[in-house]
């Protein structure tokens, strides 16, 4: 497959996954508006859809920076390393555990399709061969839509010095250096979506700082 066809295919797939994730979140929001409705299956559908969309959104960012062939190769390498390094440790949060399992499934599905693609090198110049037309610019990556509560959580992570601490075995709490303290389940949820990350180089007992990823920064920028 040549680079032009590859970028069209990959962009269409990334946009399709992003649209599916957006629809899942819309269904959850509508479900929250109905008193007494069961939200478990709607929340799980959001976790699944976001896990499917995340590696494709990251791929489009890499393509924009490195080009389609190198960007795809770098994303395949990152996804492969992520799967190899996944541990079996479970969290006390059922949401976090479910998000990790769905994320692994999303990475495997992305890898299965991406590794089957063979993008051709640019053809070498021969004698007076006509200059190749420039490749089209990649389509803009769709930034995930966030609810006001999710945006407030991201803003608190950005501005208030949010940390996750383990006050006692199995009990994790949120602390802040200043400002409003976000809910622990919301902090764990944005981390599970790849919108934020925690510094695992420190122990939970001393506190692991939480910071925004590129996707989280992009969500707040719109």
Image (spheres, rainbow, N blue to C red):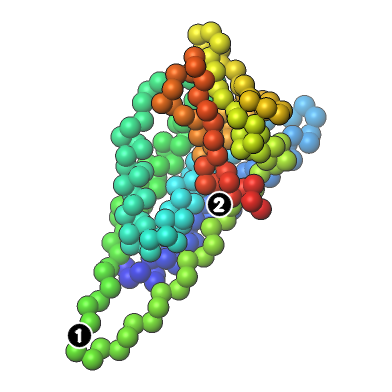
Residue 163 placement: quadrant: top right
Q: Could you tell me which quadrant the N terminus lies in? A: bottom left
Instruction: First in sequence, mark 2 or 1: give its number.
Output: 2
- The answer to whether 144 is drawn above or below residue 129 in the figure is above
At mark 2, the secondary structure is helix
**Percent x, y of residue 137:** 47, 70
**Percent x, y of residue 183:** 67, 25
Residue ID at (50%, 8%): 169
Q: Can the viewer see residue 179?
A: yes
Badge number at residue 126: 1
Q: Nearer the viewer, residue 108 or 170?
A: 170
Residue 72 placement: quadrant: bottom left
Residue ID at (54%, 62%): 140
Residue ID at (57%, 56%): 142
**Percent x, y of residue 158:** 61, 38
- The answer to whether 142 is drawn above or below residue 41 in the figure is below
Residue ID at (50%, 30%): 198
At mark 1, the secondary structure is loop
Disc 1 residue crowd, few under 14, some 14–19, many 20+, Cα 10 Å: few
Label 2 sits on residue: 18
Badge number at residue 50: none
Q: Residue furthest toward the front?
A: 177
């Amino acid at each position: 497959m040549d680079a032009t066809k590859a970028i069209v295919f990959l962009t269409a797939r990334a946009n399709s996954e992003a649209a599916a994730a957006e629809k899942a979140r819309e269904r959850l929001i509508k479900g929250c508006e109905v008193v007494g409705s069961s939200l478990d299956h709607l929340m799980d559908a959001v976790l699944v859809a976001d896990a499917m969309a995340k590696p494709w959104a990251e791929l489009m960012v890499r393509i924009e920076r490195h080009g389609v062939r190198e960007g795809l190769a770098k994303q395949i390498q990152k996804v492969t390393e992520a799967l190899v390094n996944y541990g079996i440790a479970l969290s006390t949060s059922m949401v976090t555990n479910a998000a990790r399992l769905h994320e692994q499934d999303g990475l495997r599905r992305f890898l299965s399709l991406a590794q089957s693609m063979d993008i051709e090198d640019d053809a070498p110049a021969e004698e007076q061969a006509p200059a190749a037309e420039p490749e089209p610019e990649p389509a803009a990556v769709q930034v995930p839509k966030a609810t006001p509560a999710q945006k407030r959580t991201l803003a608190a992570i950005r501005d208030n010095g949010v940390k996750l601490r383990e006050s006692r075995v199995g009990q994790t709490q949120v602390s802040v250096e200043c400002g409003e303290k976000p809910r622990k389940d919301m902090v764990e949820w944005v981390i599970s979506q790849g919108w934020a990350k925690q510094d695992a180089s420190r122990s939970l007992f001393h506190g692991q700082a939480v910071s925004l990823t590129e996707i989280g920064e992009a969500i707040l920028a719109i």
